[in-house]
Image (tube, grey):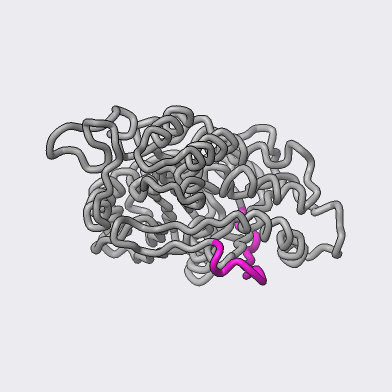
Amino acid sequence: MSARILSIGTAVPATTLTQHEVRDFFVRQPGYDRLAQRLVHAAFDASAIDTRHTVIDELAHGGTSGEAALFVGADGLLISPSTGVRNAVYATAAPPLFAAAARSALEQAGVAASAVTHVVTASCTGFFAPGPDYRLVRDLGLPVTTERYHLGFLGCSAAFPALRAAARICAAQPEAVVLVVCGELCTLHIRGSGDPEQIVASSVFADGAAAAVVSEVGGIGQGPSLELERFGTTLTTQGESDMVWIIGDEGFEMTLTAEVPRIIGREIRGAVEAFLDVEPGATDWGVDRWAVHPGGRSVLDRVESGLGLDGDALDASRAVLRERGNMSSATVLFILAALLADDAVMAGASIAGLAFGPGLTVESALFVKHMPDSA
């Protein structure tokens, strides 16, 4: 028996941002000339995002007066806190989000916390030690003997390497029950800038966490599951400097050039042909559903056209983008959660997953859906 995702739990912060309100907030910031204001309107209006979630309440409440203000002052203007301040917020706000997603996953699977043998976490928006992997053991009451692994700074594609690690653990230890949790607080690195790349980043990124219970132990799990059939990874021939995530003095700095969707559009077919082992130029990919990380609307558009997919093939990805924005590594798990819960996705359906990270790196995964009586 292969390892399976028995359940996926998700969690987002309580504060909801509507896209037009955030757009208007940025337009009001000083230092944005008329060109920058037009770029803000263009990026936000073309994002295909309606709402996002954030741990920064000040963004939704028009600022905070006095010493409590960290990101937005009482005058409604952005403050630029140091990386240390931003990371301190991450260390406080991330663990509860990780725990909420993990509790949901365990409850859905009907798996007790005491049954977990391994934890694999992924995040690229903050660092502290002992980190989220340790906090999950403490906050969920997992066994103190739980083995822990953390994948840091892999960017938006980290969920698939995390699931791949879980599958490898299960193959080596068939009795393993692995809790995989991806959590990101992307909005902590918000900044006021007229730079087109920063404007695009400000228009798409959001906060959220998702968790998966992975095991090949028979008789556990109480709902539909996703068999982890195989994984793949590919480096594109270009893009090393087009998607970059570094630590700066005033937060983590994202480089996201206009070349990213173009590179993906040019190279996605070759990467997927190799992963799915189909003939070059094939029109039938042999899969039933797609779970593609929505780095942005233009990325999804390029994947759709590059692979020659039907217009509704990426509906699940577009829905998550519209409702949640780009939550980096957690996002593709939100998409898989929707497909796992969708009764229209029948037992035996295959799902091809694609996610993109710095490099450019294309991470691929193939899943097969099972129902309780077919697992």
- 348 displayed left or right of 34: right
Location of residue 135 (image quadrant): bottom left
Where residue 324 appears, as percent x and y from the top left, is: 49, 37
Where residue 314 appears, as percent x and y from the top left, is: 68, 41
> Which residue appears at 35% of the width and 48% of the height?
98
> Which residue appears at 46% of the width and 51% of the height?
195
- Regarding residue 267, the answer to whether it shows in the image is yes
> Which residue appears at 49% of the width and 66% of the height?
165
Quadrant where the N terminus sits is bottom right
258 or 104, nearer to the observer = 258
> Which residue appears at 42% of the width and 55% of the height?
179
- Residue 130 inside the magenta-drawn segment: no
Q: In the displayed structure, would residue 132 be above or below residue 310?
A: below
- Regarding residue 106, the answer to whether it shows in the image is no
Q: How many tags in the picture? A: 0
Where residue 81 appears, as percent x and y from the top left, is: 25, 50
Q: From this viewpoint, which residue is outermost toward the left?
A: 67
Q: In the displayed structure, would residue 64 be above or below residue 122?
A: above
- 158 displayed left or right of 127: right
- 150 displayed left or right of 300: left
- Residue 236 inside the magenta-drawn segment: yes
Query: For the magenta stretch, what is the residue range?
Result: 227-242
Where residue 227 appears, as percent x and y from the top left, is: 61, 54
